[in-house]
Amino acid sequence: MTLTPQISSEETSQLRQDIVTGDWVVIATKRARRPEDFIVKKETVLSDSLDACPFENPEASGQKEDTLIYKKADGEWTLRVFPNLYPAIERGKRPRFIEEGPYFAMTGTGYHELVVPRDHYTHLALMDATMIAEILDAYQDRYINIMNKKSIRYISIIHNHGKSAGASIHHPHSQIFAVPIISPYVQLELDGAERYKKSTKRCVFCSMVEYEREQKTRVVFENEECIVITPYASRSAFEMWILPKEHSPYFERITNKQKISLAWAIKRALGALDKALDNPDYNFYLHTSPCDGKEYSHFHWHFEILPKMSIWAGFELSTGVEISSLEPEVAAKRLRECIENK
């Protein structure tokens, strides 16, 4: 395959297109900054007080009954999952459809749960791979338990780190949302992957993995099962994707061997980000095939890591086109250095 030339010093920018969704991003080299310039000084941070943390003793703070709990041999819990005390969606009910004039809506129903590891202070980037693997176990366990519930079409698993990324509690935790709709962005990926498969007879994500492994410029880390890349059309500086190397449409079917490799890939990716940008705020989330009973052999599950590097302004809001002032190739090089220097 032919290597795409990097942006030359005479070029002001490139418009790069996401091969899956068709979205465009601007890589603006006239605004270019050094990787270390993206370290953000935090004006406010979340309180790390144990006394104020509702997850230290969930029963005492009014949390609802666990839907899943992992314990050590001595009975001490290491991870627990329970319904969010302040859910964005109402638990377990079937949606009711609402019409108002030309508008359409439905009641916000489904499942909203929290995945909470025991350690109050150690955030995901600094956890042992075994603890990350246990979190992945919980993701899979709850996904399988919820996926066949009535009206559930998609399960979103997210992790917010830092105040600007939406975290409201210092204690590390992930969230599981099970909803009766498929989000427009996931649908864009599904449609894009299907178009590519019909056109080329190949999975678009497998093509990405193969090309990135050949060229290596955007590879941050890889092991036997997984690869971490900075996407060609990165929406922001230091964005990363973690993908299984083998074609795999359904995250819930992940094997124990794949889980261990994925845990190490997450640890290396987030550890490098932590070192490169001094513990930045970020969002980390899963995109996988819907659980609506349809066939999605053309899709390929993956995790996306999106650091909070900028605020959308008029151009981004009016066009939906994001601007990044750091080439993903430069970001990948810096992240690899942070792994190598550990």
Image: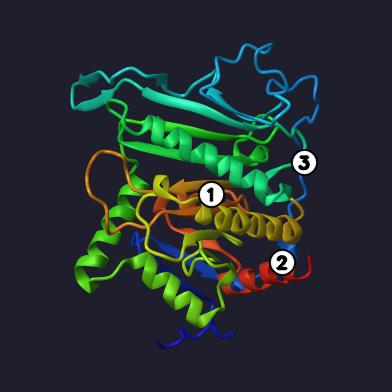
Position of 263 with respect to 96 (left or right) is right
Please name the amino acid that badge 3 sits on. Answer: Glu
Residue 19 appears anywhere in the view = no
Instruction: Tell me the residue that label 1 is attached to.
Output: 312
Q: Are marks 3 and 1 in contact (CB under 8 Å)?
A: no
Position of 34 with respect to 327 (left or right) is right
In the foreground, 271 or 25: 271
Q: CA distance from mark 3 to mark 1?
A: 19 Å
Position of 299 with respect to 326 (left or right) is left
Name which of mark 3 and mark 1 comes first in the sequence. 3
Which element type, helix, strand or loop, lies under badge 1? loop
Q: Are marks 2 and 3 in contact (CB under 8 Å)?
A: no
Instruction: Tell me the residue that label 2 is attached to.
Output: 339
Q: Position of residue 66 (x, y in %)?
A: 55, 20
Answer with the quarter of the image where residue 221 lies.
bottom right
Q: Position of residue 125 (x, y in %)?
A: 69, 50
- The quarter of the image holding the N terminus is bottom left
Q: Position of residue 130 (x, y in %)?
A: 66, 47
Q: Are marks 2 and 1 in contact (CB under 8 Å)?
A: no
Residue 288 appears anywhere in the view = yes
Please name the amino acid that badge 1 sits on. Answer: Trp
- The quarter of the image holding the C terminus is bottom right
Assess disc 2: are there few (<14), some (14-19) or many (≥20) residues with their C-alpha within 10 Å of its C-alpha: some
Please name the amino acid that badge 2 sits on. Answer: Ile
Q: Position of residue 34 (x, y in %)?
A: 71, 70
Q: Is residue 26 above or below residue 266?
A: below
Which element type, helix, strand or loop, lies under badge 3? loop
Q: Is residue 207 above or below residue 314?
A: below
Instruction: Tell me the residue that label 3 is attached to.
Output: 43
Name which of mark 2 and mark 3 comes first in the sequence. 3
